[in-house]
Image (cartoon, grey):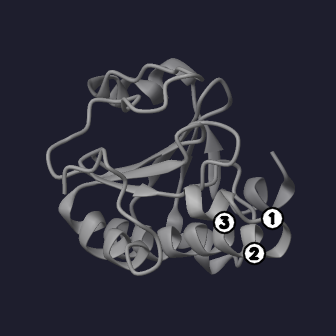
Amino acid sequence: MSSPFAAGGIWTPLDYDIAWAPFKRFQFEANYHETSQPAITLPDGALVIDLSPLFTNEGQVFAAGEAAINASALRAFVSLAGDLEMTALDWQHTPYRYSPAKHALAHIEEWPVPVFPNGDYYIHLGPDAAWGTFGHPWQRSITLWGSGLTHSLGAELLTWLPRHPQSRA
């Protein structure tokens, strides 16, 4: 873990099995080749955003889109979580507990587990896992659940990205 995360106590590594336990209810199944079926059981009201328009770009346009999604997610997480901590899961890598508020105040642009799924499945769970995000790198999508998150981050992302056909919202 890089020093900005460790020094401020912003991102704390967790035991893999314990961290993933709350996400088991979504029946996650990793599959590199599946392009149409969701990799999780979508909760009622889930909003799936299509990220494929970003992947058609390269260089600065792609990087700006990726940064915009991570920044918008952070803003929504701070609003919804307040001073509470969240869990960030990175499939087959170290999971973390972190404070989005402390992350924002530290002005850190890098995330050990980003929201934008650029290379792996990335999951961010709200304090009680009633809301969160699931980034799917091969389907180029991000799933949002929980009305607070779909009405804030979801509404914002839909102003410039399309709704994915898997969406339930």
Query: What is the secondary structure assignment of the residue under circle 3?
Result: helix
Tell me which amino acid carries mark 2.
Answer: Val
Choose the circle earlier in sequence order: 2 or 3: 2
Reply above or below: 11 against 35. Answer: below
The residue sitting at 63% across, 59% down in the picture is 10
Residue 65 point in image, percent of width and height? 65, 72
Horizontal side of 45 relative to 20 (left or right) equals left
Q: Give the spatial CA distance, label 3 vs label 1.
A: 11 Å
Foreground pick, 137 / 152: 137
Circles 2 and 1, Cβ within 8 Å, touching? The answer is yes
Foreground pick, 62 / 41: 62
- The quadrant in which the C terminus is found is bottom left
Q: Give the spatial CA distance, label 2 vs label 1.
A: 6 Å
- The quadrant in which the N terminus is found is top right
Q: Give the spatial CA distance, label 2 vs label 3.
A: 9 Å
Q: Mark 3 points at which residue?
A: 66
Q: Where is residue 20, by image quadrant?
A: top left
Residue 125 point in image, percent of width and height? 40, 47
Mark in the foreground, 3 or 1: 1
